[in-house]
Amino acid sequence: ETGVTQTPRHLVMGMTNKKSLKCEQHLGHNAMYWYKQSAKKPLELMFVYSLEERVENNSVPSRFSPECPNSSHLFLHLHTLQPEDSALYLCASSQEVGAGFSYEQYFGPGTRLTVT
Amino acid sequence: RKEVEQDPGPFNVPEGATVAFNCTYSNSASQSFFWYRQDCRKEPKLLMSVYSSGNEDGRFTAQLNRASQYISLLIRDSKLSDSATYLCVVNSRSGGFKTIFGAGTRLFVKA
């Protein structure tokens, strides 16, 4: 399935590095999301974008910086991360941002990030 | 109290068994509900939406009880391939958009 793609699939970075995660959706959706999934914890919503505008930022540390240049692409820029930031980072998209049944989210395969 | 709570797993069932999962939510203003399935080291995939009238898709039946604030997922005639983690998701618009995932219930179906 190629509805939502993410690169890279795996990333190992040092605490002083700067890297970026990329997400692209081919579903014609207007909303995109970043989630963090740590071991044995529920998915945590980090950021939500609707038509390139950020609509939600769930108290995420500033070392995570999202960018949405258009409705098909979403980036997560990383800098000076901590070992506890090691997790699976998932991107998702939906038709719109909303709480209705039409707005189910479709996920990419994720980037497994390890911070050393 | 967590906003979304699921049955603690894991559930270990034989092939052909019927298994049911529950998920409770605390926000009475919640508007939409979903079940996702997540295989080990993979992304969550939408299994089904949960409508007020209940809905069925093959061996899977989802129910919503707004009065008691819970949703359920019933799997009949379990297959080995049903082994996965099942996540409930609750969306609301009160106080801004919120989508809350449960911690998941692990299911093992054994031959």
Image (tube, grey):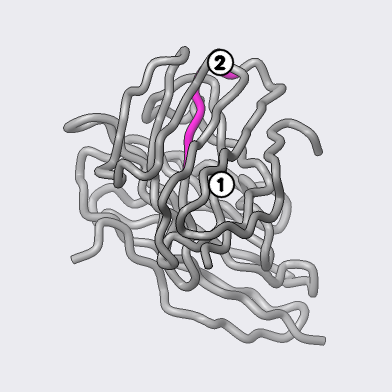
Between B45 and A60, the residue placed more toward the observer is A60
At label 1, counting other C-alpha atoms closer than 10 Å, the crowd grade (few under 14, some 14-19, many 20 or more) is many
Decide if residue A35 is on the left or right side of residue B57: left
What is the number of callouts on the image? 2
Tell me residue B96's x, y (percent). Answer: 23, 30
Name the foreground residue: A82 vs A90.
A82
Check the picture and name the quadrant holding the C terminus of chain B. bottom right
Q: Position of residue B107 (x, y in %)?
A: 61, 75
User: Does residue A74 sit above or below B4 in this rendering?
Assistant: above
Look at the image and give the residue range highlighted in magenta: A29-34
Residue at image mark 1: A90
Amino acid tagged 2: Ser
Q: Please say whether residue B84 is one of the residues in the magenta stretch.
A: no
Which amino acid, mark 1? Leu
Quarter of image, res B14: bottom right
Instruction: Identify the subunit bearing mark 2.
Output: A
Whichever of callouts 2 and 1 sits on the residue coming sooner in the sequence is 2
Question: Residue sitting at 21 percent across and 54 percent down?
Answer: B26
Do circles 2 and 1 both sit on a common chain? yes
**Label 1 secondary element:** strand
Q: Residue at x 39, y 67 (%)?
A: B6
Instruction: Please give the chain letter of the residue carrying mark 1.
Output: A
Which residue shows up at 61% across the image and 45% down it? B46
Q: In the rendered structure, find residue A49 and report the number of the disc placed on it.
A: none
Task: Determine the residue located farthest toward the front in the rendered image.
Answer: A16
Left or right of residue A6: residue B24: left
Mark 2 → mark 1, Cα distance in angstroms? 17 Å
- Is A32 magenta? The answer is yes
Q: Which residue is mark 2?
A: A71
Residue at position x 38%, y 42% in the image: A46
